Image (cartoon, helix red, strand yellow):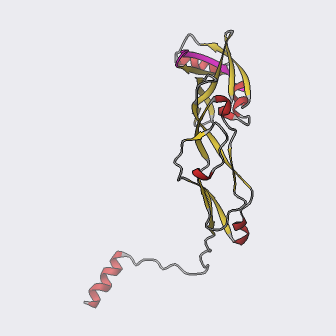
Amino acid sequence: MTDAALDASVREERTKSSLKQIRDGGAIPGVVYGKQTGTMAISVDAKDLKKILGSVTGRNTLINMNVNGSKQTVMVKSLQMDALHHRIQHVDFQHVTEDTKIRTVVPVQLAGTPKGVALGGVVQHDMRSAEVECLPSRIPDAIRVDISELMIGDALSVSDLNIPEGVKILDHPHTTVVGVAVMKAPEPAGQPEVEPEPMEEAKTKTSEKE
């Protein structure tokens, strides 16, 4: 698991005007949560945070946070986004310790091309992320699934995955991860659509038959 450094400043004020001032200054307001450390309001540099989120490990990056000279290890817990401009408005961090397991979500990545694809099959990737529980240092970048041997009609579930040592998947073992299905034949073209008769015309024809 990749580590990253991030400086933070303690926020004394929590008014809307102070939050706007923080964002206008190129920072993002946030909160650090921890069972032992309690709750602390902070702000971090927007560019530094975006760089961490854009890395391979993304939100699962272990961050060495320096808060006014005091250092602690945290992870991004949640983000509040501006729906219109897709900008980060607020960030929650979770304090972590090396000897305490945590729960997080990691991507599920497929590797290889199924043999069934050459026979007309199509890959159906149903489960694109997995919830895992492990020590912070054991968080995988992704769960990689080899699908090269799959034929049409084959599927892999959570119980079939090759999980790294020390990592536990919390999703149901029978949940389908990926499969190879028969490609649906396209509907024949050129068939005219028959529009339903208007209600009034249908009533008139019925009356005439009577």
Q: Quadrant of residue 50?
A: top right
Identity of the residue drawn at 55% across and 21% down = 33
Residue 162: image location, x then y, percent: 66, 48
Residue 102: image location, x then y, percent: 57, 30
Is 19 rendered above or below residue 170?
above
Residue 174 is a magenta residue: no
Residue 207: image location, x then y, percent: 27, 85
> Which span is picked out in magenta?
35-47
Quarter of the rendering occupied by the N terminus: top right
Front residue of 3/10: it is 3
Is 172 rendered above or below residue 5?
below
Residue 46 is a magenta residue: yes
Q: Quadrant of residue 31?
A: top right
**Main SS class of the magenta portion in the image:** strand
Front residue of 66/204: it is 66
Quarter of the rendering occupied by the C terminus: bottom left
Identity of the residue drawn at 63% across and 50% down = 161
